[in-house]
Image: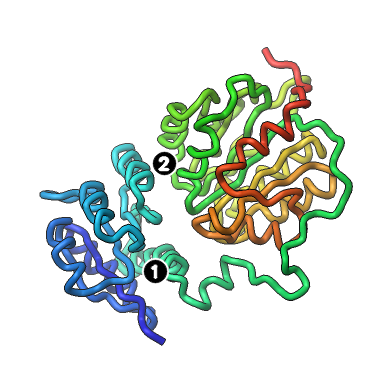
Amino acid sequence: MPKIRVLVVDDAVVMRKLISEALMRDPGVEVVGVAANGRIALQKIPMVNPDLITLDVEMPEMDGLETLRELRKTYPKLPVIMFSTLTSRGAATTLDALAAGATDYVAKPSNVGNVMECIDRLQHELLTKIKIHCRLPGAETLYRPVKSAVTAPLAISSRRPSNLPAEVVCIGTSTGGPNALAEVFKNFPASFHLPILIVQHMPPVFTAMLAERLNTHGSVKFHEGAEGQLVAPGHAYIAPGGHHMTVQRIGLTNVLHLNDEPPENSCRPAVDVLFRSAVSVYGGKILGVIMTGMGQDGCRGCELIHERGGQIIVQDEASSVVWGMPGYVANAGLADKIVPLNQIAGEITRRTQASRPMAVYQ
């Protein structure tokens, strides 16, 4: 089997070495070149013919964002994984890069005790994404459910349509999620009257920046979730990176609660944690939405929503960057509808237009 050819671009000699060592641990990956800045990288691409590029966000001469924009003119489909620091500047530039066509991103290891621990973390986070985005056969079975003869074509939930009015919309997404969320909410109706609770798998700092960005895309007011925050109609709350987010009913109001309990599905925040808490508060009066992302986080939560009579819609495979999370829900027969990204906003509003929030807000 041919190896995945990777070009590593970073201005720091140490990071180039660490990334290269992490990748070379895998016999299926070959580092075919390194570059200290974007200008050198652009010159090397036709020489080494990479299958994927890792691209540092902050570099002299030509930074990662400028390099990406130039690269996309000639190589529109070449996978590019951005490397970013856990800073506001790094998060902002990474979100710009995703909007400009970056395939994915990885946060640079921080607070790491030693070199081997750093390499281990890079190997865990980066290799998985490289194999998925390069469509390596073996990696897909871990994060993209295989369709069996029994479930093909995909089974839509066969139960009767739910007659429970939704009181909340709960959304789970991961890889490809920032752009997908921007697409969903750019034309959202100003009259939308339900609260929206979101888990987007992202590290700290990034989720706050994402909420700020999404505030520029439409009429819904976005917040990074905070401890004790009131859940209000027409507002959206994104679980902060590094914390699970849950919802609790206190008297006649619903509020957010954050915790640092162990990751679920290797994620914190986790979609299943949010969905499980939402079911405890809203019962089946939930519209669950699962969009593009690796893994199966959210599947168990959707089972709980389904069991209580709530509604579930998922993004289709063709419009997903990675059809892991929505694919697991679809293949489990839990989806009331499978729709492309550009129809999700309409499907949400159609399914909630007759609903009204039941809690009292002050």
- In terms of depth relative to the viewer, which is nearer, 84 or 234? 234
Residue type marked 2: Phe
Say whether residue 288 is left or right of residue 113: right
Q: Which mark is residue 123?
A: 1
Q: What distance separates the C-alpha of mark 1 from that of mark 2?
A: 21 Å
Q: Is residue 249 above or below residue 205?
A: above
Residue under pointer 2: 206
Which residue is at the front of the view, 13 or 200? 200
Q: Is residue 303 visible?
A: yes
| Residue pictured at 25% horizontal, 47% vertical | 65
Q: Residue furthest bottom?
A: 1
Give whichever of 92, 96 is nearer the camera.
96
Which residue: 77% across, 26% down?
355
Farthest left residue in view: 61
* Residue 308: mark in rendering: none
- Against 196, is 120 above or below? below
* Residue depicted at x 33% and y 39%: 92
Q: Residues within 10 Å of mark 1 (few under 14, many from 20)?
A: many
- Whole-percent x, y for residue 120 in the image: 39, 68
The amino acid marked with disc number 1 is Gln
Residue 259 seen anywhere in this rendered image of the structure: no
In the shown orientation, is residue 246 left or right of residue 75? right
- Residue 46 position in % (x across, y down): 19, 70
Q: What is the total number of numbered labels drawn onto the structure image?
A: 2
Label 2 residue SS: helix
Secondary structure beneath disc 1?
A: helix
